Amino acid sequence: MFADSSRLPSSGNPQLTEEKTPFSSVKPSRLQVAQTVMKKLVPMTSLALALSAVVCYADSGQIRNISAFPTMSVADARSTVTITAIVVNSKGSPVPDGTQVTFSTTLGNFRNEVVTTVGGRAQAILVAGGVPGTAIISVKAVGAPPATYEFEFLSDRSLLSSAKEYVEIVAPGYMNFSLDSKIIGAAGPRQGVHVRYRDVEIDADDIQLNIPTYELRIKKGKVKFGKLEQEFDECYIKLNQRKGYGTTTYMAEVPSKVVGFGRGITFLTEEKPRFGVVEFNGAGVKPYSKRLSATAFEFQDLSESMSMVSAKKAVVFPRKEVQFQKAEVLVGGVKVMKMPLYSVSLNSGATLVTDQIVNINNNQIAIDYPYYLSLKPGETSVIRFRTGERYGRGTTASRGMFLDYELSWNRGDEMDGGLTFSNIARKDWSLGLRQYLRLDSKSTASAMLEMPAGKTLFGNLNYNRQLDGWSLNAYANGNHNLHGPSFTSQNVSFSLEKDPIKVGKLPIKLYYGLTADYKEARSSNGHTFQNGYGLRLRSQLNPTRLDKDTMFNASFSVSQLEGSGVSKGLTMLGSASLSRQFGSSFSAVAGYEFAKDPFSSNLVGSHRVSLQTYYNAGRTGFTFFGSRSLDIDRMNYYADFTYRLSGLWRLSGSYTFDQFLSDSYLDYNAVLGYRLGLREIGLTWSYRTKRFGIQVFGASLN
């Protein structure tokens, strides 16, 4: 939220270290200023520690965490994703079994939007829609603030492999990562910096990598991939496209002399070295005669970055995180932490690296401290200490302390898995295992197993295979109580779909196929059973550009099941989205979702509209997300804003409203902030608590 000042940009202080580097300089006067600021913040930290003992407002049934497996999927209208929400009370312990939790999404559809908890976990199955994009998933327990989670549906299955790509940078001389700009800069004499991305290898004196755009700039370096092996004075390369431009010496044919040829003359040529601008790819280099941008080879100045990490080696996962070896964390040029292994999330929204580790939430110190046991491209293991976690969009924070062990492994797009042991030495411990495998070039499989407190087993299995002209998808999930009341459930689904068929000259693709579904549940109260099979037809509109700033997309599917215990009638699913860019500072996405099936439509509704807007210009920033069902009382509206009154003063706030039938949640707050050095101190007010407070280090003290 914009009300969280840790996510707001600040002017920052220049980079200060004790040695001169290509990215920083020694400025004692500014170092003294930074030290003065730190001295002023010490009493405030003491105040925060004192206030941490104050009894705070807390709701029951808070959403502590939302996760998805797999972490990305394809918008093919059949792939399934397991969304898991961990629901706890204010002490961090699991809520009682049977607590009701509701799920909603802007893309795709949940098989069951209202579920109940078992062992503090609520699981819902999200079925992909036909429209690619980022789905905003909202999860809410009764009487508690909602929590949101963003999940990306890709347009093509081939894009899943690129999501696991990484860039490896080794710089024994010097390397800095700027959290502000998401850029890594490195330098080393005699081509001492080494960069590797897939088959691309680069040795250079200086490099800068813009992580979100995959743009790499180098000075005095050698680039090698494919048939190319070339030295460049300056170079720009788009890594994920494997092409670029540079200045280098290359061999070119030039006229050498004029000779007679019959009754005329001809020019003889010979190859000679020339220096100039070339374009290149894996096949080699060739002269480039067009005009390049004046900033094509220009490095950005990282010395003004407020928050940085210095390291000897970095492994960059552009969609996820940056892993460092021999890391030093710098804030305002002052070294605040040194760790042998460290990782920084690229999606946290924090403006200071330290905000990902320590903060203050709802009168409590919030800590998420990772101690890495191993950190390398194929394996990561970490012991994590957590306390004071903030829940959802509310002001409530956990008062428990937790210790987790996390182990993850991967091999590019061939394999990805992990093991998690959460809440070690607590009664509410949990063990989780997940694994993804690419079995061959045409088939993949994934599995997940969770056991909270040794009382219940949750599991699911997913299998996809591309046949000649057809696509096969199989999915199974279930849970079984190991202790307590007897309960077992299982669900198995199967689909076989024909590859897309073009509809004449229309921008539409048609798919048809078979579908089958099996559901069973057994408990001490009885036994339910359902077994159905039938046909399915789906249409997909090609993304259509209405004008240079407006894009429209839509999909629709219909299916009919027959069998034992199956509700009669057609199941229809549809979605449409309209996105528009209004200049450089404002954009909006409007959506419509339609879901009609004989079982759940009366409970969760059939029609839903949504709107997302983003505005950022000058001193003002604003985001809004809203959705509303048209046939039942179900809606949610989330808004965040910030306005910079001056260089030192800022006004910000947030608004949250969520309603499902008779259960609703409302909260809004305002913050008047004053910037002091690298931090902001603000006077806050919350509608939910009806109290004023102080905001320090980007967290509320109510």
Image: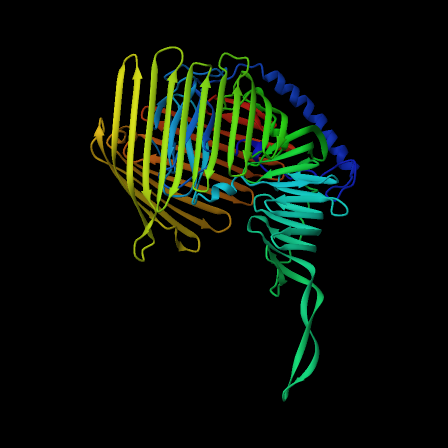
Image side of residue 37 versus residue 431, left or right: right
Mark count: 0
Q: Does residue 401 lie above or below 5 as drawn? A: above
User: Is residue 480 among the parts visible in the rendering?
Assistant: yes
Residue at the far top: name it.
484
Q: Does residue 417 lie above or below 404 as drawn? A: below
Image side of residue 702 versus residue 307, left or right: left
Image side of residue 444 versus residue 420, left or right: left
User: Is residue 677 among the parts visible in the rendering?
Assistant: no
Q: Does residue 198 lie above or below 564 as drawn? A: below
| Residue depicted at 38% across the width and 20% down the height | 479
Q: x%, y% of residue 161?
A: 50, 41
Q: x%, y% of residue 534?
A: 24, 36
**Foreground residue, 664 or 524?**
524
Q: Does residue 550 lie above or below 91 as drawn? A: below
Residue at the far bottom: name it.
263
| Residue depicted at 34% across the width and 18% down the height | 488
**Which image quarter holds the C terminus?**
top right
Q: Quadrant of residue 484?
A: top left
Q: x%, y% of residue 371?
A: 63, 24
Q: Quadrant of residue 25?
A: top right
**Foreground residue, 306 or 545?**
545
